[in-house]
Amino acid sequence: MFKLKYFKYIIISIFALLLGSCTETTNQVRPTRSQAANNFTPSNPPARGPADTLAPRTNSKEHRLALVIGNNDYQDSYMGKLRNAVNDAKAIRTELTKRDFEVLYHPDATRKQMF
């Protein structure tokens, strides 16, 4: 009698687990990884636009100074020659100049020139 009582509880527990794990099936096809990547929606808002849409600070009396260095060719570099570092530095120099910065610009500066 003792064993039969536990056997009933075991059978009822297994039946409850099986019944609880049943879910409704649908005919939807799960997307592949590439399809899911194509339908990605970012959770943060997109950027406002290019940097030149920001208003420069014209009423400021402070002296603003920027050091801009763009190196395409490092002397002891394992990376080799870079393509756009100097061009990027020129673009930064232009934007900072528009915003009333005094810009010290050094393309392809050596270590000695930087220090």
Image (cartoon, helix red, strand yellow):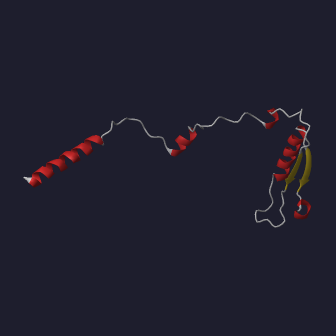
Quadrant position of residue 80 = bottom right
Q: Position of residue 56 (x, y in %)?
A: 85, 34
Q: Is residue 74 left or right of residue 11?
A: right
Q: Is residue 37 left or right of residue 66?
A: left
Q: Nearer the viewer, residue 42 or 80?
A: 42
Q: On screen, 11 above or below 109?
A: above
Q: Position of residue 7 (x, y in %)?
A: 14, 51
Q: Nearer the viewer, residue 113 or 62?
A: 62
Q: On screen, 92 above or below 24?
A: below
Q: Quadrant of the C terminus?
A: bottom right
Q: Is residue 2 left or right of residue 36?
A: left
Q: Residue at x 26, y 41 (%)?
A: 19
Q: Position of residue 55 (x, y in %)?
A: 83, 32
Q: Residue at x 53, y 41 (%)?
A: 36
Numbered-mark total: 0
Q: On screen, 35 above or below 53?
A: below
Quadrant position of residue 94 = top right
Q: Residue at x 76, y 66 (%)?
A: 78
Q: Residue at x 81, y 54 (%)?
A: 83
Q: Farthest residue in the left direction?
A: 1
Quadrant position of residue 15 = top left
Q: Farthest residue in the bottom direction?
A: 76
Q: Position of residue 28 (x, y in %)?
A: 41, 36
